[in-house]
Amino acid sequence: MKKIFYKKLIRDDIPERIKESGGKYLCKKLSLKDFKKELLKKVLEESSGVAYAKNKKEIISEIGDVLDVIDEIKRNLSISSTEITASRKSEFKRKGGFKKRQYLVWAEDTGYKTNERKIK
């Protein structure tokens, strides 16, 4: 059978599901340092699922996956909900929300550097 190389963090029960379907697999246990690094990559993977969801049911499922990964990041990096709430309030005060539904087409280069990656 053809091998697919995923090279990514997976949920705990995935190996058992592969085995039950008759497949073989290779997993390794990550060090805590590597686990934290892979968690941060996983949130990007799961977030992209939201962008490509086709209906409300898929969106709900993908948001749930994102929240699970974020909860694990918070747990592993000892980030409290209070810290997140304070950061959200600060960012809202600084940049506002999304109620106006504004879409930026272009702006002059003022030296501002965004941290986003393009989603196609």
Image: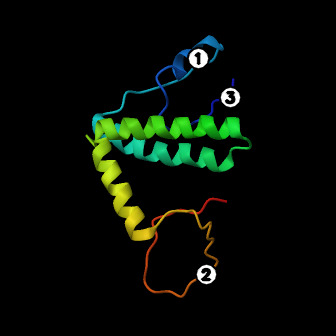
Secondary structure at numbered mark 2? loop
Relative image position of residue 70 (x, y in whole percent): 42, 41
Q: Residue furthest front?
A: 99
For label 2, the residue is 106
Q: Foreground: 26 or 76? A: 76
Residue in the image at 45% along x and 86% along y: 110
Q: CA distance from mark 1 to mark 3?
A: 17 Å
Mark 1 crowd level (few <14, some 14–19, many ≥20, 10 Å Cα): few
The percent position of residue 77, horizontal first and vertical second, equals 28, 42
Spatial separation of the CA atoms under disc 3 and disc 2:
46 Å
2 horizontally vs 13: left or right: right
N-term mark: 1 or 3: 3
Residue behind mark 1 = 17
Whichever of callouts 3 and 2 sits on the residue coming sooner in the sequence is 3
Residue type, label 2: Trp
Up-down relation of residue 84 to residue 93 (above or below): above
